[in-house]
Image (cartoon, grey):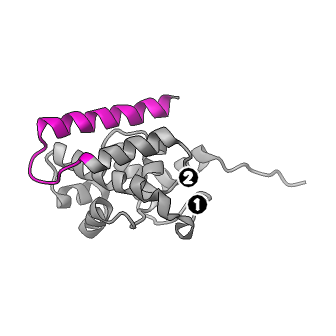
Amino acid sequence: MAERRVLDASWYRRNIERAGDLDFMAGPVSPLEYREEELPITIAFGTLVRLERRSKGLTVGQLARKLAIDEDEVRLIEHDSSYRARPRTIVCIAKEFDLPSKEVMKLAGAARSKDHALEEAAYKFAAYSDDLGALTSEEQKMLMSFVAFLKDKARI
């Protein structure tokens, strides 16, 4: 009798990381399954990427080169809450900014979450951001606080 392999999150993560520049979707959620109520979380994902990029002093082009994606994709991630980044891109973003990939996948809409605390924190974070120039000290504090929240969620 053939052995049945269980495909868990770590299996998907290993295969996404091994795939390099290949594009594929992994996991149970398809882009057609997103619901309207998930939009605030994806807004927070774009805000997080934009603020992290700005806090590191990176241009859109520089971040795109680091992630090995098109500049247009970075712009879509940052400004279009309906855009769904590929899992490989999400994992690369999490690594680039030293964020927990599981929580970033939830923010990006690539993993379902019934975590109301995450949704509330993400919504508040996205609503507060300003997109002009260098990060203000208040934006820097807000970004650091949200990143700390995500890392704490990952430890639970």
Residue at 45% x, 41% y: name it: 118
Label 2 element class: loop
Q: Which mark is residue 29?
A: 1
Residue at 57% x, 51% y: name it: 12
Q: Is residue 89 above or below residue 31?
A: above
User: How far apart, in angstroms, are the residues tagged by discs 1 and 2?
Assistant: 8 Å
**Front-most of 137 and 22?**
137
Residue bounds of the magenta highlight? 128-155
Quarter of the figure with the N terminus: bottom right
Q: Residue furthest left?
A: 133
**Front-most of 74 and 20?**
74
- Disc 1 packing (10 Å; few <14; some 14–19; many ≥20): few
| Residue 140 placement (x, y as % from top left) | 19, 37
Query: Amino acid under label 1?
Result: Val
Asked if residue 151 is among those painted magenta in the image, a careful observer would answer yes
> What is the tally of numbered marks visible in this picture?
2
Residue at 44% x, 62% y: name it: 86
Residues under numbered marks 1 and 2 in contact, where contact means CB atoms less than 8 Å apart? yes
Q: Residue furthest right?
A: 1
Q: Which mark is residue 73?
A: none
Residue placed under numbered mark 2 in the picture: 112
Label 1 element class: loop
Q: Which badge, 1 or 2, comes first in the chain's sequence?
A: 1
| Residue 112 placement (x, y as % from top left) | 55, 52
Main secondary structure found in the magenta portion: helix
Query: Disc 1 or disc 2, which is closer to the eye?
Result: 2
- Disc 2 packing (10 Å; few <14; some 14–19; many ≥20): some
Q: Is residue 65 above or below residue 51?
A: below
Res 71 → quadrant: bottom left
**Front-most of 22 and 24?**
24
| Residue 36 placement (x, y as % from top left) | 48, 64
